[in-house]
Image (cartoon, grey):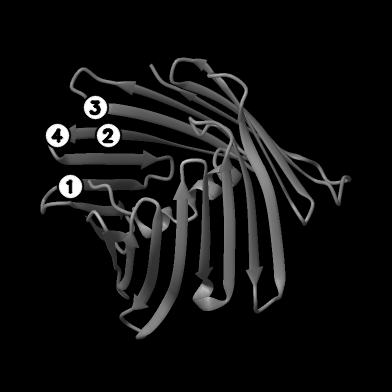
Amino acid sequence: MSKGPGLFSDIGKIAKDVLNKDYTSDQKITFSSYSASGVALTSTAVKKSGFSTGDVAALYKHKNTLVNVKLDTESNISTTLTFTDILPSTKTIASFKLPDYNSGKLEVQYFHDHATLQTILALSQSPIIDVSATVGTPSIAFGAEAGYDTKSGNFTKYTAGISITKPDSSAAIIIGDKGDSIKASYVHNLDLLRKSAAVAEFTKKFSTNENIFTVGGSYAVDHLTQVKARLNNNGKLGALIQHEIIPKSLLTISGEIDTKALDKNPRFGLAIALKP
């Protein structure tokens, strides 16, 4: 869309992805394929806590419109319509889930070289409006978001943040939970392709005086294999290895143990994503 500062949700996202993305304690397999008409089909099966679920999704793109329909094993039908450039520099996303008629959402994103604006309207019996804005550049950005319940007349949330991004590092500070928490993160890239990185994150919740400090990182063993690890001050140690078994197909094995309670069973997860 533009070369601007990005959405408010992008603030702190780099550190969040390194510390949380691809970690799982479930067993998951995903298979993707493409039809001759250009429809992308994705089937997913998940086993979590002894229960199995699954879904089938179809993705179709026609000009500036993207249609995504998903049917799960609980007979829920989720539909997402994405329209780009209805207006210049905008993206409009409409989503709903059946039979939950109160699940509809309408989202509009506006991108500018020095600012972005995002508005989300939850189309329920008690409509909630979320608005976020970011100003700056790709190097430094300031942003804020707020949620408003039109029925009660109360703010459901308000958050503010700042991010600084350089070629070899990035840092972010987010004040959230209506001012009750603050999160600071720092990422240092270890290579030019940003495939290896070291991360430190600190979170403080003022109402409970709880402090969580997490360190972690990712390392590209080679162009097919990546390992990640994280450890926080509560003793939770996690690690994963991800390998591209064939082009575009990934095998991920992850685990987590509580180093302060070694008598507890460790948690393990396995994910396989197969693409043609």
Q: Which tag is nearer the camera, tag 3 or tag 4?
A: 4
In this rendered view, identify the residue nearer to me: 30 or 3: 3
Residue 268 makes an appearance in the image: no
Left or right, 154 with reference to 121: right
What is the quadrant of residue 34 in the picture?
A: top left
Q: Position of residue 171 (x, y in %)?
A: 53, 54
Give me the disc on residue 39: 3
Give me the disc on residue 62: 4
Q: Position of residue 89 (x, y in %)?
A: 17, 51
Residue positioned 31% across, 69% down in the render: 131
Classify 10 Å Cα crowding around label 3: few (below 14), some (14-19), many (20 and above). Answer: some
Secondary structure of residue under mark 2: strand
Give me the disc on residue 59: 2
Which amino acid, by three-letter code, is at mark 2? Leu
Left or right, 248 with reference to 269: left
Which amino acid, by three-letter code, is at mark 3? Val
Q: Earlier in the sequence, mark 1 or mark 2?
A: 2
Q: Earlier in the sequence, mark 3 or mark 1?
A: 3
